[in-house]
Image: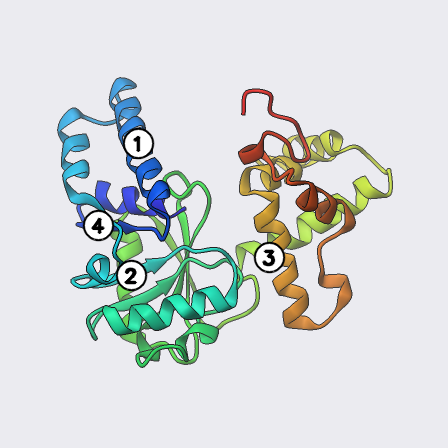
Amino acid sequence: MGRQIALNTALHGYQVTLYDVDPAALRDATVWVGDYLRERVARGRLTSSDSESALGRLRTQDDVARAVESADLVIEAATEDLQVKRRIFAELDRTAKPSAILATNSSTIGSSKLAGATGRPGKVANLHYFNPALVMQAVEVVQGDHTDEATVQTLLEFARRTGKVPIHLRKEIFGFAANRLLDALCREAIFLAEHDYATAEEIDLAAEKALGHPMGPFRLMDLIGLDVIYLMWQEKVRESGRPEDGPPQSIAERYERGDLGRKTGRGWYTYPDG
């Protein structure tokens, strides 16, 4: 997600620095960016000039302090782990300039749980992209009680200027808007499959051919990543305290096996080509 958010932002004219705690991830991101841009040019969807300009605006940095020292906006896209994110936000608060907005791309953790790790709660909010971030148009801007109105307006305008359609949630709720809808759809789909009412393929066909969805819930979960889905539901049960909000058995089993969807070659479906 991080590298796609970074490249999308660079393609829309912004200077971007991409940081990761793992140097290998930065190297992989650099290779991926080059391959992606070359493919777009080859297909006639991007000019060589625009590709070179985007590359010139995007750099990588393996030191977080140097990465964020001049940033006006920092977008965190780490794993869905509250303590990890709180440590990151505390570090960002120390290293970013006082005027910088600190946004989290989290799909489940509201920024109210992160703002207290900083001395700038008014400049903390959720800026939630959808996967794949280069393709999906929607971005959720979630306004916590702590978030300044100026911060919200800046994020809404930033989303528009980077080719996105912002969805403004005026107060926090677990899962925001899109994931609450996705939660209901996926849970019902899994219920039908686990109780042998229909196969995953047939349920996907029902969503695609009867409801007009571009992708059925099982195909969509494989695309998102079953680890993301599993951790989202783990966070939900911690939030609510209700066991029924936890991951269904068939999701938990796949997560434990490491069958996480397209990224691992197997999830609800198998992907022989990786």
Q: Which residue is mark 3?
A: 232
Q: Which mark is residue 74?
A: 2
Q: From this viewpoint, is residue 6 visible?
A: yes
Q: Nearer the viewer, residue 265 or 152?
A: 265
> Which residue position holds label 1?
31
Real-space CA distance between mark 4 and mark 2, rounded to the nearest whole angstrom: 10 Å
229 displayed left or right of 55: right
Q: Write the residue at 14% across / 39% down.
A: 56
Whole-percent x, y for residue 79 in the image: 48, 55
User: How many other residues sit within 10 Å of disc 1, few (<14), some (14-19) or many (≥20)?
Assistant: few
Query: Which mark sits nearer the N-terminus, 2 or 3?
Result: 2
Residue under numbered circle 4 = 16
Q: Amino acid at mark 2?
A: Val
Res 196 quadrant in image = top right
Q: Residue at x 54, y 42 (%)?
A: 224
- The amino acid type of the residue labelled 3 equals Met
Locate residue 49 relative to residue 5 in the image: left or right: left
